[in-house]
Amino acid sequence: MSVCSIPIGPFHPALKESCYIRLEVEGERIVGADLKTGYFHRGVEWLASRRTYHQLIFLCERICGICSDAHATACAQTIEDLVGVEPPERAKYLRVLVAELERLHSHFLWFGVALHLMGFDTAFMHAWRDREVVMRVLEAVTGKRVVYAYPTIGGVRRDLTPKVARFVESQLVEIERAANRLRDVVLNDRMVRARAAEVGVLTREDAKKLCVVGPTARGSGIDIDVRRDDPYASYDRLEWSVPVFDEGDVLAKTLVRLMEIFESIKMVRQVLRDLPDGPITNEEFREPPRGREAFDRVEAPRGELFYYMRSNGTNVPERVRVRTPSVANNHSVPVMLIGYHLADAPLIFASIDPCIACTDRVEVVNVRDGSVKVVSMEDLARRRVAL
């Protein structure tokens, strides 16, 4: 049987963001796959070196609308490490509150997309209806439904009043009911099991080799989570667990996100119960000295989010580098696609919860000979010594 090449994208009705997927199929079975991004580059890292440290947080949280608080928190924590500022305890708890609400929102959104791709549009509508409850809670806490502008250098921008805290607590009851309904669908519906079980398997060995992160890694039996392994904010003072499944298929990644919804609800309740009194900001900001470097990481809904900064002695950073979870996870897609049916491809791709806009990077190509500029580790080491 001959092998056919099927191009998907870069502009396609099924794609919410521009990317190019080439599938090699033999009959209905995928025998080769390639994923190419680069159609959505916005030059955020270049813009970052032209913004003050306070402006930088507003820029970075626009890297991804779904993970905006994770970006703002990682950016703020990196700047705090750079200048030596410690947020108050109350601010640390409030950062966890918004981070876990954002995780709830992201996971309900993902469940809607996944169920739609399975052909289960009724459950898709239910998941997005329940997502709306989380968005109302986020609006009450931060003042905005998306791109919350909540973390700032040395704390958070808005306190939690007793009235809003009571509202959050009351809405958690409805969110938990929604999570239980979702659990019944995932565990008991035969169509979900048929579409997700033993499909798009990423083995533990491949997951380690490709350095995947977040639910993609935990669905392949890799027990990692930045919130536990490198605690930040107030995560080390809360009781929670990290869901891990060994199967590596789409269903395993689905179950990881399902269990994380219940863990996030548990953490939000603990924050509301244990929230300490005190200020919400520490305004001891000062410009970092030239040549100082700092990095920080947080556990975004999709996985580890990494920030690096270098100062130049002014109130504008010299260099900002961001590695988003999708940069790590996208490499696993071709591996997961091979051997499965063409109809499974959209769901397998969606199982990593890809964000294309936050993935795109620049590739420098010589137009004369087509060669690509690659910076080696030795080049990076020499440049760092020269600073």
Image: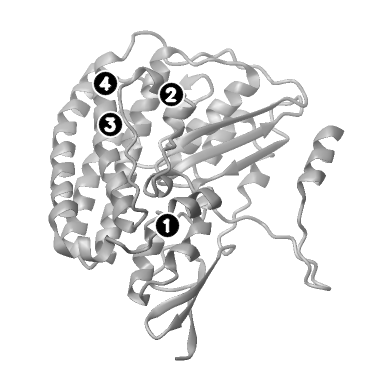
Image location (x, y in percent) of residue 50:
68, 39
Q: Residues within 10 Å of mark 4 (few under 14, many from 20)?
A: some
Q: Say the numbered circle drawn on residue 140.
A: 3
Separation (CA) of disc 1 from disc 3: 39 Å
Labels 4 & 2 near each other (Cβ < 8 A):
no
Quadrant assignment, res 189: bottom left
Separation (CA) of disc 1 from disc 2: 41 Å
Residue underneath mark 4:
270
Q: Residues within 10 Å of mark 2 (few under 14, many from 20)?
A: some
Looking at the image, is mark 2 or mark 3 earlier in the sequence?
3
Type of amino acid at the residue the image marks with label 4:
Gln
Q: Nearer the viewer, mark 1 or mark 3?
A: 1
Image location (x, y in percent) of residue 141:
31, 29
Instruction: Please report the residue visible at 47 percent of the width from the left and 76 percent of the height from the top.
Output: 31
Type of amino acid at the residue the image marks with label 2:
Arg
Instruction: Please report the residue visible at 21 percent of the width from the left and 58 percent of the height from the top.
Output: 124
Separation (CA) of disc 3 from disc 4: 18 Å
Q: Say the numbered circle drawn on residue 202.
A: 1
Instruction: Please report the residue visible at 40 percent of the width from the left and 46 percent of the height from the top.
Output: 66
Image location (x, y in percent) of residue 117:
29, 65
Residue underneath mark 2:
157
Looking at the image, is mark 3 or mark 4 earlier in the sequence?
3
